[in-house]
Image (cartoon, rainbow, N blue to C red):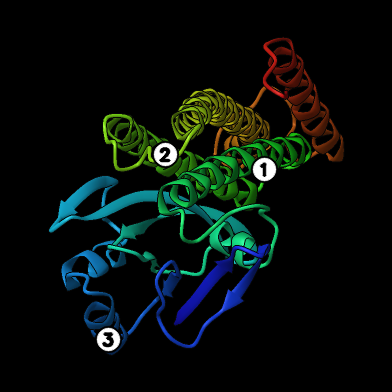
Amino acid sequence: MIQIFKTLDDKPLKLVPLDNIEPGCWINIVAPSEEELILISKKASVPLELLNASLDDEETSRIDIEDDILSVIVDIPFTEMEDNSLTYDTYPLSIIHSENILITVCLKNSKILTDFINGKVKTFFTYKKSRFTLQILSRVSTYFLLYLRQIDKKSLMIEKRLHKSMKNRELIQLHSLEKSLVYFSTSLKANEITLEKMLKLDIIQKYEEDKDVLEDVIIENKQAIEMTEIYSNILASTMDFFASVISNNLNIVMKVLASVTILMSIPTMISGIMGMNIVFPFNTDSINTFYVITLLTLLICGTVAWILHKKDMFR
């Protein structure tokens, strides 16, 4: 999908869609076909390799400058539905500066860019490529922080459910959140290196206050890294805690089963002995003998049960 937009000087708050590429426009490319990439490469005079870079979901964050064309690749957060559950992941986003055009390329449609298209971000200009790039990066940091808070709230909800019932579903969800935090941590640290490099590039800081905006983005990114580390540690300790609880519950069940097995084996042992050809000091043919043996069995079972209870074998 290819979308072309431009902000006009007389309408700075309105993004105007275009049919053709014009100087000062923004080209938003989402999950493009090979034909679309070749078309944009020719019309915008951008190397095909730069357009293809972010379409590899394993691509790392970096800065490339080729033939006076700047390409900034950063990892951005995404949410996806998987097995009726919201999961979090990251994908690379390319922001390319050609001579008079800004191009964004991503494998999936991102809320970060749709916020600009839908007017949720005020006062941005497509022809101010450096400032627009910094505003996109600021939005990336904002969404990282937003999703991190969502992950924290979601983990607390799952933890409350686990206190009531130990189900595999909740444990799998916690594991999924733990993986998401690993992805976020890796992406944020890679983005941090890229942002630090951008501080040294004059091409990014063309307008007044650009350096302040970039420094704010770096601070937000560092904050997101710290939050990710905190939530990862909390989630890891939570997983360890519930693993210990599950192991303890299993030990309790095994103790109870062992105790029940011991008690059930006593009548079997006594009846087996009494059924052998062994001479006993009392008349085994008497009807009273049955009651004596039954009473003796109950007495032994009761004594063993009391001993097991004292040793906490039933809880």
Q: Callout 1: 10 Å neighbours few (<14), some, many (20+)? A: few
Q: Type of residue at label 3?
A: Leu
Q: Earlier in the sequence, mark 1 or mark 3?
A: 3
The answer to whether residue 129 is left or right of residue 198 is right
- Judge depth for marks 1 and 3 and give the one in front: 3
- Using the image as rendered, state which of residue 49 and residue 307 is in the foreground: 49
| Residue 260 in the image, given as x and y percentages of width and height | 67, 34
Disc 2/disc 3 C-alpha distance (Å)? 37 Å
Q: Earlier in the sequence, mark 2 or mark 1?
A: 1
Give percent across and percent down for residue 132: 49, 51
Q: Tell me what residue is drawn at x 52 percent, y 82 percent.
A: 18
Q: Residue shown at 52%/73% (left/top)?
A: 5
Q: Where's residue 56, x and y in %?
A: 27, 64
What residue is rendered at 30% in x and 67% in y? 55
Q: Quadrant of the C terminus?
A: top right
Picture quadrant where residue 28 is located: bottom left
Q: Nearer the viewer, residue 205 or 268?
A: 205
Q: Secondary structure at mark 2?
A: helix
Circle 3 Cα neighbour tier, 10 Å, few/some/many (<14 / 14–19 / ≥20) = few
Q: Is residue 92 left or right of residue 42?
A: right
Asked whether residue 184 is in view, the answer is: yes
Among numbered discs 2 and 3, the one appearing first in the sequence? 3
Q: Which residue is mark 3?
A: 39
Query: What's the residue type where badge 2 is placed?
Result: Val
Question: Which residue: 56% across, 28% down?
Answer: 231
- Disc 1 secondary structure class: helix
> Of residues 269 and 4, which is closer to you in this image?
4
State the residue position of label 2.
Answer: 182
Residue receiving disc 1: 150
- Residue 313, compared with residue 102, is above or below; it is above
Quote the CA–CA distance across marks 2 and 1: 15 Å
